[in-house]
């Protein structure tokens, strides 16, 4: 929404102004007098402009008189665990929000038990939503937070830092903003507070000083020690839940709290011009309880930041995303040329100090006694003082993110395979492994989202190329790179039977063997497999020295372990001496074969022609004494079994059989796999927004 400006100085007025004062500037003795005249003339023009606004319509209208009852407001935040001093600060912040109005509810994005316990104390007004996207280390995604917040049914959605205190003027500002007859987005920079000598009473409604006396006015909170940086500080962002989007395009997968995401969103909202965007930093008092330990520090002893959250690659990732997507890097908006909502002498004003524009807000009925009794001249004088305050505030007129940009370098996760295994393995020292190239990034993410929905967190991703490695890091996945791949991965021509497929499959068994030797059990799973439920308890029950694998047999009757019917895209291997020895034989056989690794699995373990078969579903490798157990196809169907993929409702058909998984194989090519799987409903990811699909999701799935 572009706001026309009835208060701009006309060219004629400026020419007259210059013709009168210009001669003074050539006379050194008169120069000082000329400057004083310029200053005086500027104040006169502001006063005249302010008077003119009483007679001119506002460029935005209001829905009517502001009522005592305000809009329903949902505040969204992503807290850290409620423990220690961090938990105390966050608890104080949440209580400050709840005490503002009974119309406020709070949603905490977290998967931490302490957050659930805290929310129970304030239920039902405080709830926990774990169903957004997080990285494998627990950092929430900003784009997922915003999407979930936009899906709220409340009148106003707020995204705020979890240890930011709100003071009572927040509610009044929200009431005024809610009356704008146009969709809007506001932001408010926080003041940084290192010492906050106040606390809430037992009811959470009144602020008390250390001596127990009640804080009566906003001025009682004012302190010279509080630092306000409009550029670097944390922000509150709010919008009404109207019909218009916040901005054009798609919000990149920024990591929350790792820099630039707030500025990116505001910049795009301003450029998109869908909503009226304004700065409410002067009308909303929000105080961020500063924690110096949170500051990003590359010299920290905890360089990887696994404990403290100082993860440098996350900050670099946000910087790279802001440079690649949107216009912040190329066309940053000038914050000095934005409207600011200002509370001045009891009035609320929209001020554009750079353009010398003031719009006082007038309503039927009065919200302030001061507004009723203040004389016109006094109000105008007060307005001029307020405008000058904005103009003189550091950072108000020059707020650039230029210093935030880092050199765009390839991002990397500084975690070795050993560290990732120790972080991700479950209590039985088991990991689920996916080995994938960039061409299958959509399927990788759908697979990951499904495992997340099943609360299966012990998975790892082995990247076969640089593109999928970078993509996986930005998606917050526990990824490591296979460094010895000797061929490039074709985007659309790496399916069954191709040379690319043969080389890729041989990598899988090598990686599995490497992890087994490190002492971890492995469930190898291709990413074109949809999981209905967790198969690990069943698969691990077969015990050591048993390799459990999916059968690729499509015939409905007869043995399921006939030659070349072992599917190496889904198998479970224990980390024991005999299984490791058997996998070494498979890897050695595959290295000397012109085929994929799949025939090597069968020929090595079940014997060429199947001479090591001991019944219709098992083989016994005689040298290592490892048993190969082929899985029940009703529970672990392949892509050709009983034509399940041709069912009108694949999910229902599989669930009726009690399926643990279904494999999207026996079909050639990436595109054909997607065309079969996505419409079936066995899909969990939206590539257009780079988010896992949730029950609250409102976007249409795009996968090509």
Image (spheres, rainbow, N blue to C red):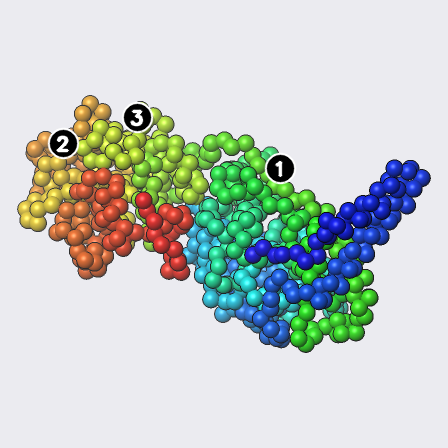
Q: Secondary structure at mark 3?
A: loop
- Determine the residue positioned at 52% across, 55% down: 274
Q: Nearer the viewer, mark 1 or mark 2?
A: 1
Of mark 2 and mark 3, the one earlier in the sequence is 3
Q: Please indicate whether residue 541 sits to the left or right of residue 20 in the image.
A: left
Quadrant assignment for the N terminus? bottom right
Q: Residues within 10 Å of mark 3 (few under 14, many from 20)?
A: few
- Determine the residue positioned at 72% across, 49% down: 11
Relative depth, front residue between 368 and 213: 368
Q: Secondary structure at mark 1?
A: helix
Relative depth, front residue between 63 and 97: 63
**Residue of label 3:** 487
Residue 637 picture location, percent across and down: 18, 49
Report whether residue 210 is seen: no
- Determine the residue positioned at 62% across, 61% down: 59
- Determine the residue positioned at 50% across, 63% down: 241
**Residue of label 2:** 603
Q: Quadrant of residue 580?
A: top left
Of mark 1 and mark 2, the one earlier in the sequence is 1
Report whether residue 375 is seen: yes
Residue 658 picture location, percent across and down: 20, 57
Q: Nearer the viewer, mark 2 or mark 3?
A: 3
Q: Residues within 10 Å of mark 2 (few under 14, many from 20)?
A: some
In the rendered view, tell whether residue 466 sits above or below residue 663. Answer: above
Callout 2 touching callout 3 (CB < 8 Å): no
Q: Which mark is residue 403?
A: 1
């Amino acid at each position: 929404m572009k706001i026309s400006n009835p208060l701009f100085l006309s060219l004629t007025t400026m020419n007259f102004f210059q013709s009168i004062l210009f001669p003074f500037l050539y006379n050194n003795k008169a120069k000082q007098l000329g400057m004083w005249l310029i200053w005086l003339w500027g104040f006169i023009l502001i006063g005249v402009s302010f008077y003119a606004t009483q007679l001119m319509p506002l460029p935005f209208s209001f829905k009517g008189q502001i009522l005592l009852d305000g809009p329903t407001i949902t505040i969204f935040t992503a807290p850290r665990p409620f423990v220690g001093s961090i938990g105390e600060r966050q608890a104080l912040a949440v209580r400050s929000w709840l005490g503002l109005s009974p119309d406020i509810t709070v949603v905490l994005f977290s998967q931490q038990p302490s957050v659930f316990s805290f929310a129970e104390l304030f239920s039902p007004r405080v709830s926990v939503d774990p169903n957004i996207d997080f990285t494998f280390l627990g950092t929430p995604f900003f784009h997922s937070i915003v999407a979930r917040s936009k899906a709220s049914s409340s009148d106003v959605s707020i995204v705020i830092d979890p240890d930011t205190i709100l003071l009572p003027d927040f509610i009044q500002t929200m009431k005024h903003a809610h009356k704008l007859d146009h969709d809007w987005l506001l932001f408010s920079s926080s003041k940084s507070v290192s010492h906050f000598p106040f606390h809430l009473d037992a009811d959470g409604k009144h602020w008390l000083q250390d001596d127990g006396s009640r804080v009566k006015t906003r001025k009682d909170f004012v302190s010279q020690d509080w630092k306000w940086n409009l550029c670097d500080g944390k922000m509150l962002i709010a919008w009404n839940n109207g019909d218009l989007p916040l901005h054009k395009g798609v919000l990149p997968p920024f990591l929350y709290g790792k820099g630039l995401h707030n500025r990116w969103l505001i910049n795009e909202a301003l450029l998109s011009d869908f909503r009226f965007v304004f700065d409410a930093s002067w009308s909303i008092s929000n105080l961020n309880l500063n924690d110096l330990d949170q500051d990003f520090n590359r010299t920290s002893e905890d360089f990887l930041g696994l404990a403290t959250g100082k993860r440098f690659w996350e900050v670099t990732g946000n910087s790279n995303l802001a440079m690649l997507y949107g216009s912040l890097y190329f066309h940053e908006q000038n914050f000095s040329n934005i409207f600011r909502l200002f509370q001045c002498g009891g009035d609320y004003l929209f001020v554009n100090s750079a353009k010398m524009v003031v719009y006082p807000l007038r309503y039927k009925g009065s919200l302030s006694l001061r507004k009723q009794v203040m004389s016109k001249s006094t109000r105008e004088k007060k307005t001029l003082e307020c405008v000058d305050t904005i103009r003189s505030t550091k950072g108000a007129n020059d707020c650039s993110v230029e210093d935030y940009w880092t050199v765009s370098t390839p991002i990397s996760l500084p975690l070795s395979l050993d560290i990732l295994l120790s972080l991700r393995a479950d209590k039985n020292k088991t990991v689920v492994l996916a080995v994938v190239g960039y061409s299958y990034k959509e399927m990788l993410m759908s697979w990951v989202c499904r495992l997340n929905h099943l609360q299966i967190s012990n998975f790892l991703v082995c990247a076969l190329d640089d593109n999928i490695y970078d993509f996986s890091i930005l998606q917050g996945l526990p990824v490591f790179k296979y460094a010895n791949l000797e061929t490039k991965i074709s985007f659309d021509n790496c399916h069954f039977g191709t040379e690319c497929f043969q080389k890729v499959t041989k990598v899988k068994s090598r990686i599995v063997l490497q992890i087994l030797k490190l002492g971890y059990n492995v469930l190898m799973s291709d990413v074109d497999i949809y999981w209905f439920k967790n198969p690990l308890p069943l698969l691990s029950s077969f015990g050591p020295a048993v390799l459990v694998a999916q059968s690729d047999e499509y015939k409905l009757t007869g043995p399921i372990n006939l030659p070349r019917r072992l599917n190496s895209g889904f198998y479970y291997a224990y980390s024991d001496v005999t299984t490791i020895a058997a996998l070494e034989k498979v890897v050695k056989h595959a290295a000397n074969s012109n085929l994929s690794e799949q025939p090597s699995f069968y020929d090595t373990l079940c014997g060429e022609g199947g001479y090591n078969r001991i019944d219709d579903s098992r083989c016994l490798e005689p040298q290592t004494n490892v048993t190969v157990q082929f899985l029940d196809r009703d529970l672990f169907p392949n892509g050709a079994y009983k034509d399940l993929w041709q069912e009108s409702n694949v999910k229902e058909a599989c669930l009726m059989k009690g399926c643990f998984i279904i494999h999207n194989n026996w079909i050639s090519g990436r595109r054909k796999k997607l065309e079969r799987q996505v419409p079936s409903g066995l899909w969990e990811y939206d590539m257009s927004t780079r988010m896992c699909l949730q029950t609250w999701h409102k976007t249409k799935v795009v996968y090509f």
